[in-house]
Image: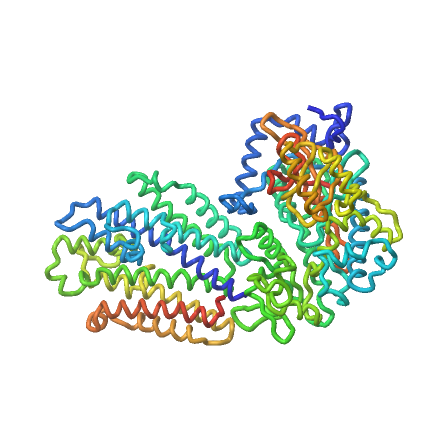
Amino acid sequence: MLGRTAASLFWTSRYNERAENMARLLEVGYRIAMTPRLGQDAADDWRSTLVSAGCESRFFAKHDEINKRAVMLHMLFDPDNPSSVRSCIEAARNNARSVRTAITGEMWESINTTYIEFMEVRPQHMSDDRLPDFLSWIKQRSMLYRGALLGTLMRNEGYHFSQFGTFIERADNTARILDVKYWILLPDNEMIGGSLDRYQWSTILRSVSAHRSYRHAYRDAHIRPFNVAEFLILRKEMPRSLAYCYDWIEESAEALAQRYGEHPPSHEMATATAALLGKGTMREIFQEGLHEFLTDMITRNNALGTQLAADYHFA
Amino acid sequence: MEQTGIFNEMLAADGTPRAPYRQLANWFETQSPSLMRKKSREAETIFRRLGITFAVYGTAEATERLIPFDIIPRILSASEWRRLSAGIDQRVRALNAFLHDIYHRQEIIRAGRIPADLVIQNEAFLPEMIGFTPPRRVYAHIIGTDLVRVNEEDFYVLEDNTRTPSGVSYMLENRETMMRMFPELFQQNRVAPIEHYPELLRETLESVAPSNCDSEPTVCVLTPGIFNSAYFEHAFLADSMGVELCEARDLFVEAGKVFMRTTRAPEQVHVIYRRIDDAFLDPLTFRPDSMLGVPGLFDAYRAGNVTICNAPGTGIADDKAIYAYVPDIIEFYTGQKPILKNVPTWNCAKPEELAHVLAHLPELVVKEVHGSGGYGMLIGPTASKRELAEFTRRLKARPGNYIAQPTLALSACPTHVASGLAPRHVDLRPYVLVGDKVRITPGGLTRVALKKGSLVVNSSQGGGTKDTWVLED
């Protein structure tokens, strides 16, 4: 397989995943905006949304102040924002287009249709009442692509490079969401947690579509920050947790190593991080410092992406 | 509706369908107009979703567009096709012999059958190719011969397209779409299949692998990338042949051999089906500013370690100034009379011919010698006074840059329009493969001028395409 093909498969999946995550962050942002303010400044919540999405500095390069509509337009439609849904869909499609020979017709048609239909949407017509449907459409289109990938792509190296793209992006997203609000998850908060905190905890869960599954995983009427952190970091049954992502990453790293008969540095990095998440406990993580732990995860995850590109000659 | 002197491929002079179209005409009678309109829209949706697009250069949104697809097929009988394919076969063999000759002993020039200047001074003549013989002496492996029909008997060759002819993916997708939408038509008519084209292409490419290749040859398609107007086709062909689609940055030359950069060890490439122009192949040999090329590729080629298809320097064979000599070329190398006609052509470089062209401009079609895609041409009969004046100026300024031909009465085929069926002018581009043997796919791409009365079929100028059927006996 061409190195460039591997790179494009990686990035197609990565951008596809990012588009979905952006839509979910915006959904949560809108939910917050609909809830009574609880004495808080609305701009702070939108700022958290921008920070979680990694779009804060770009946003302020173009805007002086935060407001709902500006954030929405920036995260959905701004071509200058490389992480806007528009940019993600366009990048995913361009990458897919450059490797048409390595993906299936179903995968291509799903991403191409998403692109065509997205480009027909006029930002100025995106009113508040249409937004929820639009956001859920984005998520569904992204899931459709992933479904087409899982259901039709040969289990060869291309599949594994795609999986890397999805889960490196997802791990990054989950780690960021946690890190933006890490202080409200510190154990001290559990004692003093007021309604605002409870609300914030459930917001974190919603950001990763976990507010329902959390209830099933922890049979306790109250949302507890310790559990929220554990759920998103260590619980392997949670499909957006760091441990879950690294299970897949390790599997793909192993499959590539088997296929090529070599264990390059990225394999070692994937295995080490997976082991850390597999054996770790929340007590240790809190002792070490949640923020430090999350920062370390984000760094490791980025480094893995870079090493993968070097090991497999991404052009 | 009937324009005088225009050959209608479906209807004979008495208004009854010609033999090849009889079944289709009967079938169409039984279809409701609203269903036909619906099918036409459906076809467009299919093409858009599949991403079968091309880019138009020079428009504000220089992005992807669809080539309009007309749901009424163009039909040729078995006997019509036999004669056409014999003529094409003869022509491509002669052109390859010509290419070999002018890059070696130049017998045709010595024999005085073609002026030396026309070859040697030609921009498309590549001195770097002199003395080099590609495998099997084949230069132009993939050729699209542009034909037009003017009456029951006569087809003319308009152009030979020996560089990188495009459009074959439309030929294949048009057929797929027709079979999906109108399966009953394929039960009523015995239509020669074309779906094996990608296999034929791969066989052809493998058959011209370098002689020192002792393994299964590795073939790849070389594309300029996703922003090229024919990118869809490049991907389509690579995919349907089951070979890698490479950009120049995916290839490199080491020790005179060409390799692909893969996720693991570099892999040697033996045959490159390139869809980039000569000038962009290799910045070390040709344009140093090329971002598209592979440094050292040409040396690897001349060392006999890789085959480039089509060979560099084949452009001389479809040069519009050389075109006028193709009948001589055929006779010189095959000893036979040409089966297909050439359009009479005035070479404006010659003062007496230029004078004739200037005097008859409103009746003629004027083309740039090196132009393609319908850009920069003049169609005398439909041109405005201003356009005529402009071309008169250009012809006088750079006569050698132009040729002129009579305006041919292109045949018309029934085409689906808002009011039902209406005749529209068509041409035909059959696709020919030359390797260990000559392989011609029955039919080809029919392009249709969708504007009433228009003679310009190029997709960049508002042309559409049709599925093209060759009926079996």
Q: Considering the image in quadrants, where does the N terminus of chain B appear? A: top right
Taking the image as shown, residue A37 lies to the left or right of residue B74, namely left
Above or below, comparing residue B260 to residue B313 in the picture: below
Q: How is the image coloured?
A: rainbow
Residue B306 sits in which quadrant? Answer: bottom right
Q: Is B187 drawn above or below residue B289 in the view shown?
A: above
Q: Nearer the viewer, residue A224 or B317?
A: B317
Residue B473 seen anywhere in this rendered image of the structure: no
Is the residue B443 above or below the residue B163 in the image?
A: above
Q: Residue lying furthest left in this view? A: A192
Q: Residue at x 82, y 54 (%)?
A: B115
| Point 40% across, 52% down: residue | A87
Horizontal relation, residue A230 to residue B123: left or right: left
Position in image of residue B244 (x %, y %): 59, 61
- The quadrant of the rendering that contains the C terminus of chain B is top right
For residue B44, what is the image quadrant? top right
Residue B268 in percent (x, y) is at 62, 70
Instruction: Tell which of B15 and B112 is nearer to you.
Output: B112
Asked where in the image residue A289 lies, by quadrant, the reply is bottom left
Nearer the observer, B319 or A214: B319
Percent from the top left, x then y, of residue B221? 62, 59
Residue A63 sits above or below residue A159 on the image: above
- Residue A183 visible in the picture: yes
Q: Relative to residue B134, is residue A135 drawn left or right?
A: left
Could you say where residue B315 lies in the image, as x and y percent from the top left? 71, 55
